[in-house]
Image: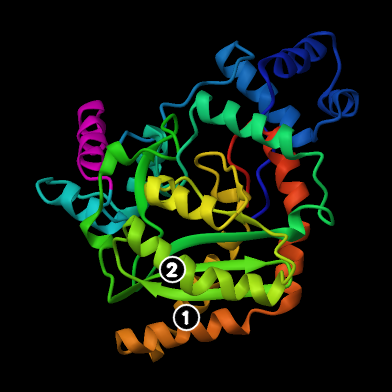
Amino acid sequence: MGRKSKDLSNEERYTICKLHDCGMNGMEISRAVGKPKSTVYSILSSFQKTKSHKKKTGSGAKEKLSIRDQRSLSRLIKSNRLLTNNAVLSQFNEFRKEKICKRTLDRYKKKLGLNRRISGKRQVLGHKHRVARVQWVRAKRSLTLENFWKRVIFSDECTIKLGHRNRVWVWKHNDEGTFRPDLYGTPAAAKLTRYKVNVWGCITSQGQGMLKVTAANINAEGYIKILDECLWPVVLKFFPGGEFVFQEDNAPIHKARSVKEYMKNHHVNVLTWPAYSPDLNPIENCWAVIKQQLKREQHLISSQEDLIARVHRIWSDLPLGYFKNLYKSIPHRLRRVQVLKGHLTKY
């Protein structure tokens, strides 16, 4: 069956009828308006019967769902944003005499503006934090990779979970934002963690630093112990002259009085860091690589010890070129923050 052509407008139909009134036959009208003669004759035949050039508006197919039914469907979906498509169809048809099919459900969901999407993981930053990020970037834009950023040791803590569902599908209306945890809360179905491990790590422009398994909750004393065991071997290996800058985020334990005194007594130059800025820290990319690799190998992990061993192996296998590229991306990260006026970047 051939493709249906676009219907003629009422103005075009009126033109054809007028030309016929002026004495032109169907073939001449077809050449004049550039339409098939079958279309011209069909319009003229309709005009002779109805005495009107306007196209008759068809009644169309009867609506499967009434306005009331559509409201019921909307309430069902919004009452549980985590329902699957099949669950919505099953629950909606449960008490209906006339069942609807999946295709009809999809059509009405689209009509209601409801779509199943992946919940956004990033929260939109407030004005205060965006301004602080832009001000920090402006102060650091003059620093070059060779003269400053290559001397920075980036550090961070991370919780690595195996079997955890990071991507949660939820029903959202078209005008609802990407990050709306108030709509669906914390889904119980996402809590499928088999094993998890907490680690502290640091990186340099010359390669990975130390990676240490830590307790779930670290206090200031525990953090100082980690620095004693893991920071100074990295400094001796990569910065024997002692000219380095240490980066840490704004976690409460990093701001403890005892930690500040430790940094001061050991002459550690700590880089000031804007709040809510994981996209500026290259080590976050390392955590992402580890989690992606573990996801591919999770069928081989059967214990907590296996998980820890594989985390250490993936960490040690990260190539030197990877770290060099991460450090080369720092100036571009700063530019993107400024271009986006403080909003979180793709990094």
Q: Is residue 276 left or right of residue 282?
A: left
**Furthest-front residue in view?**
265
Q: Alpha-carbon neighbours of circle 1 within 10 Å: few (<14), some, or many (≥20)?
A: many
Viewer-proximal residue among 3 and 137 = 137
Q: Is residue 305 above or below residue 5?
A: below
Viewer-proximal residue among 115 and 2 = 115
Query: Under tag 2, what secondary structure?
Result: helix
Q: Quadrant of the N terminus?
A: bottom right
Q: Amino acid at mark 1?
A: Val
Q: Residue at x 28, y 71 (%)?
A: 193
Q: Is residue 10 left or right of residue 19?
A: left
Q: Amino acid at mark 2?
A: Ile
Label 2, on which residue? 226
Residue 119 lies, in percent from the top left, at 41, 48
Instruction: Give residue 140's quadrant in the image.
Output: top right
Range drawn in magenta = 65-81
Residue 64 in view (yes/no): no
Residue 285 lies, in percent from the top left, at 59, 63
Residue 279 lies, in percent from the top left, at 59, 49
Instruction: Give residue 138's quadrant in the image.
Output: top right
Residue 135 lies, in percent from the top left, at 66, 29
Q: Specify whether residue 22 is painted magenta.
A: no
Label 1, on which residue? 311
Instruction: Give residue 327's quadrant in the image.
Output: bottom right
Q: Specify whether residue 66 is painted magenta.
A: yes
**Magenta residues: mostly which secondary structure?**
helix
